Amino acid sequence: MNTLNIIPYPLKSDRQEGFFHLLPDTVITVETTTRGLGEYLAQQLRPSTGFPFDIQDAAQGKQPTNCILLVSESFPQTSEDGSYSLSVDSDNILIKAPTGIGVFYGIQTLLQLLPGEIGRQEPLPEKNWEIPQLTIEDNPRFSWRGMHLDVGRHFMPKAFIKTYIDLMARYKMNIFHWHLTDDQGWRIESRQHPKLTEISAWRTENGKSYGGYYSQDDVREIVEYAQERYITVVPEIEMPGHSLAVLAAYPELSCTGGPFEVPTTWGVFDDVFCAGNENAFTFLEHVLTEVFDLFPGPYIHIGGDECPKTRWKNCPKCQERIRQEGLKDEKELQSFFIQRIGRFLAEHDKHLVGWDEILEGGLAPDATVMSWRGVQGGITAAKLGHPVVMTPESHCYFDHYQSSDFLNEPKAFEGHVLPLETVYAFEPVPAELPPEMARYVLGAQGNVWTEYIPDSKQAEYMILPRMCALAEVVWSATHHRELKPFLARLADHYAYFDAVGLRYRHHEQR
């Protein structure tokens, strides 16, 4: 039998002879718990097929025919949330799962079994919409299957954020890490601190104001859009470093008092939040309180990376804080800063996430560590009993070049190369981590930093098809991880990218 061109590849699959054909009178049959999912499926199928896909309630005891049946109830499978079964015969299709998220993932698999043209927004009246007869049982390997997007360096429009979320959903990824603030821009409306959108959201480039921000209504809309696709949005509010855009609006929160401008160059800047200034903590608590209201998920990412200690070493307030708290040095001052913010988050039932620099000087209780400078930070955190997300630059930074043919690739980060094959070879659980510690590895994440990605079309090119490779890494069982079959399956997905109008790099491109 032919291999199923599904990414990520399911745990168990059995292909049979024959097909189910979508027809003008095919219906979607739902229970009360799956009606919203039925509407979602119909919305995906109607534009390209031109068929109505009426939604009907399941009739108890009646065997449906020529329908797609969505069932959310317990069935024999002991796996984490997200498991589902899919069966297709000539009469009907059944997607069955313990929870709505499993039904949703079954829908994504079903959509991938259709020709890629299913992504078109115009009807194809002559198209034969057939789905192979089969049975599938499936569940994810990791609970954190993430994609990150930096909108601080270059603002990305709301429509693209939704496209990004749709791509994540198609490949069963479930964490959208939204990097909303950095030195070069603040991208989220604060009603308590309006200068963040009046000043911090904009910089001057070529004599013109450049930037943008998301209103609180925009954020709510995007969060709801993600929730409907079973994706948790994790906002990142950078501190204590990467905060120069904030200091341009509120220089009194720095060690020196400024003045500052929102920078137009990349890199690491010495001016950061003053760790000895109570007003800095008051400001951050105000901002985070607004963030809590917008993001109902359990995680808040506070950055914590690349914070120079230059200003702190020469700041009387910071040095006094070190003395008052009995700290040894500026590294412990950073730990004090992170732990204080961590306590504030905990008081509001939120979990702190930070880059692996938050290990310096001692971890905050309950902190989740994102290991980006290799995997060693993740190993250290796991051995301390802390949750870990592996996102090493060597395998997960999609701002790096996709090949060494630099002249024929879009400008990327400092000549670093991350080909598709390297992403696919990534193993999130390091071999040197003792087996009893492996449970602390929640999963992995692809990062898209945008210093050299000025617009959404280039962002599409940088993530596709590397996102597909990482999706399989974090979902599929390791025995399905073979590069050659993956590349063969991947080729079938380009038709979908074309139908949707996405820019991507073909894996055979040299």
Image (cartoon, grey):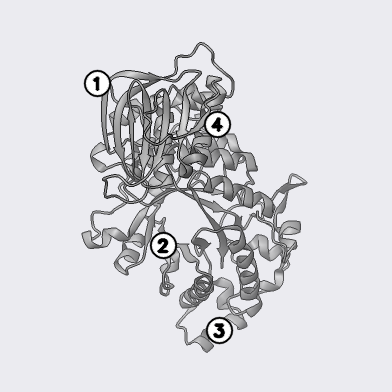
Amino acid under disc 1? Met
Mark positioned earlier in the residue sequence (3 or 2) = 3
Mark positioned earlier in the residue sequence (1 or 3) = 1
| Vertical relation: 121 (above or below) 261 | above
Q: Are marks 3 and 2 in contact (CB under 8 Å)?
A: no
Residue matched to label 3 = 321
Amino acid under disc 3? Arg
Mark 1 vs mark 2: give the one in front: 1
Mark 1 vs mark 4: give the one in front: 4
Mark positioned earlier in the residue sequence (1 or 4) = 1
Question: In what element is the residue under mark 1?
Answer: loop
Residue matched to label 4 = 43
Q: CA distance from mark 1 to mark 2?
A: 43 Å
Name which quarter of the figure residue 489 lies in: top left
Mark 4 vs mark 3: give the one in front: 4
Question: In what element is the residue under mark 4?
Answer: helix
Q: Residue 123, position in %: x, y?
A: 57, 18
Q: Residue 233, position in %: x, y?
A: 52, 52
Residue matched to label 1 = 1
